[in-house]
Image (cartoon, rainbow, N blue to C red):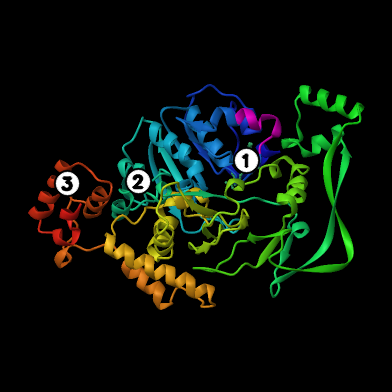
Amino acid sequence: MVLRRIQDEFGPLPAKHNLLLGDFFNTEYLQGCFDCVVGNPPYGGTFDPDIEDRLDRLYGVWDGHKLKKETYSFFIARSLDWLAPGGTLDFITSDTMLTIKTMGGLRRKLMDTSSVSIESLPSFSDETTQPTLVLHAVKDGRCPSITIDGAVLRRDLIELTGNFSWRIEPEMARYFRGPTIGQFFVASSGMTIGRNELFLRKIDDGSVAEPYLFEFFGDPLTLEKEVQRARLHKLSPRMRQRIEAQQAAGVVRRNVRAVDVPHPISVRLPHPDYKYYNKASSAIVYEDPTTAVFWRDDGDALLTFKKNGPWYLHGVGGQPYFGREGLTWQLIAPRLNMRYLPAGYILDSGAPAMFARPGVPYDELWFVLGWCLTSEATRLLKTAINHTRNIQSKDVERLPYPHWLLDDRKEEVVALVRRMVEDAREGARFDRFSSDLLKLEEMFALPTPIGGAPPVPGLDLFGEVAARRMRISKTDEDSLRNKAVAVGLAVAELDLKGG
Ligand SMILES: C[S@@+](CC[C@H](N)C(=O)[O-])C[C@H]1O[C@@H](n2cnc3c(N)ncnc32)[C@H](O)[C@@H]1O
């Protein structure tokens, strides 16, 4: 039928052809046998479960870097393998491939094997809102740069970002040459409960209403239930055998159920059975807790519920950080909505959080919160680090740390942000146009050279300050200072002597 449609549209087929209709991943060709591959692969599609793990082993990693298990990335990876030397690949595909860390392996594979150019498509199809692009690659060996919408992007710039970003802009390089936030803070996602309504309670005027009693019971183990819980609903023959034996022996697993109480019980917080729960919110600076979680006996009921659910609920994301003081933000947001997270909270996956690494001075919390509230931090994050709607924990770790601020300015920031959080805890509300936010924008602005002279090639003003902070050798410092003097830049402002 497909052949007939092709004939109808393009005219009679040649007497001999190799047109095949089948699953791309279930068809074998010799490596390197095609001169040209053209495609518009599905995004977010699923794989035949029988071959999913095999494909992941074949294409999931390139040179130690991940290729996300996504239909389009595996279509591209496999097509590259099938191309002959000098062959070309042209794909319409999702633009998520440009920045996200989990596609870093795909970007590397492309650059390690081919010359690459990208053309953004302003609009593509009514069927998708996902921004798309045309990827053109010629398999002619490793390339030192790529072309994006006509502009050349060098590999050394791409390498500056922890995510091997194809969206770093040359003027951003100065930010990315210093340390990152991840050197001071460790960021983590939180957990997914599976059924929030069973365990989360909205805080209303300092109280929650509890509609359930939780009952623990011994749940008989059955093969059927275990298959339902398993990843891809598959169990190895050994596991099956073991479960069948356990089922025959009447083994039970500890499970929990929620029983309705006739009238919800009002509980005043704080209460030993409840903890504050860090739900995502668009608030910045600070927000009073809005939600509590039933957490009697260290969350026994909730954790038991998760353990009995499908395989993807078994992990407890962020558990080592539960209760710690730090910073938190909304996972899905057009900008970095960062706020202070007091001690004592249980973490939700919708609001990643970060915590000072051992030995990091306490004031860094306020300093980094101030930086993350600037539009410049959001711009770097949403342009170069991850331009999709998600702001993952590791994305924030990859943000440049504001190394260009000298100590006196840093103290001012710390005092300001500490006061902002105190004010917010007293009821003040902040938005992007609050005067304190605008002040932070100014305080974190990169210093400009005297007389507004354009940046001088070879001299990286901000790299210098970073170097001073990181205590580079005296000789290097001298040579940097000489370069700065030679071009008449704001050496005094850099205060290299104090280093
Ligand atoms: C984005 S559509 C493109 C359709 C068409 N080529 C075009 O450009 O209009 C992706 C197509 O890939 C097909 N597809 C998805 N997974 C596939 C696989 N594993 N093997 C072959 N085709 C697949 C889908 O059926 C769908 O027709």
Q: Nearer the viewer, residue 385 or 97?
A: 385
Q: Residue at x 15, y 54 (%)?
A: 497
> Would residue 411 appear left or right of 64 to someone viewing this image?
left
Q: Main secondary structure of the magenta part?
A: helix
Q: Name the quarter showing ligand 1.
A: top right
Q: Is residue 73 above or below residue 278?
A: above
User: What residue sits right under mark 1 in the picture?
Assistant: 6
Q: Is residue 81 magenta?
A: no
User: What residue sits right under mark 2 in the picture?
Assistant: 147
**Rendering coords of residue 20 (x, y %):** 63, 31
> Would residue 319 appear left or right of 307 to someone viewing this image?
left
Q: Which mark is residue 477?
A: 3
Q: Residue at x 49, y 68 (%)?
A: 285
Q: Is residue 165 above or below residue 450?
A: above
* Amino acid type, residue under disc 3 in the picture: Glu
Q: Regarding mark 3 in the picture, which secondary structure is present there?
A: helix
Residue 236, quarter of the rendered image: top right
